[in-house]
Image (cartoon, rainbow, N blue to C red):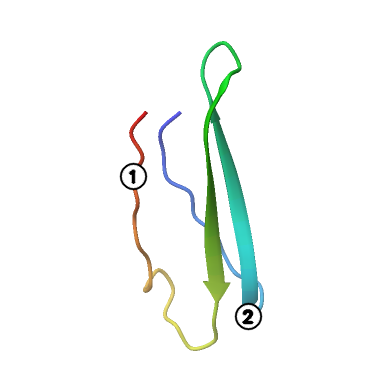
Amino acid sequence: MPGNVKATGVKPGLTYVMIDVYDSKNKRLTHASVQLTVQNGVKPNGNSARQYGIF
């Protein structure tokens, strides 16, 4: 299901989001790990990057 994800930080720190992509037969195609750093003093929606994967 394509789409965008928005994360809102509660307090400064570091977290990871892990993503597994499966096919229709429940076979894992790939895994991705995204690091999110929450910092004080950045404007909302101000620091972002996009990365695309094609399967």
Residue farthest top in this picture: 25
What SS does tag 1 mark?
loop
What SS does tag 2 mark?
loop
Name the side, left or right, on which 38 lies relative to 47: right
Q: Tell me if residue 49 comes above or below residue 40 in the rendering.
A: above
Coordinates of residue 53 in the picture (x, y in percent): 36, 40
Please, what is the three-letter code of the amino acid marked with disc 1? Tyr
Q: Tell me if residue 29 comes above or below residue 32 in the rendering.
A: above
Residue farthest bottom in this picture: 41
Coordinates of residue 4 in the picture (x, y in percent): 42, 45
Question: Which residue is found at the position 44% from the left and 83% from the top?
Answer: 42
In three-dimensional space, the C-alpha distance between marks 2 and 1, rounded to whole angstroms, equals 26 Å
Q: Label for residue 52?
A: 1
The image quadrant where one finds the C terminus is top left
Residue that badge 2 annotates: 12
Return the disc, 2 or 1, that comes first in the chain's sequence: 2
Rendered image quadrant of residue 12? bottom right
Coordinates of residue 39 in the picture (x, y in percent): 54, 82
Question: Which residue is found at the position 61% from the left and 17% from the top?
Answer: 26
Q: Label for residue 3?
A: none
Question: Which residue is found at the position 56% from the left and 75% from the top?
Answer: 38
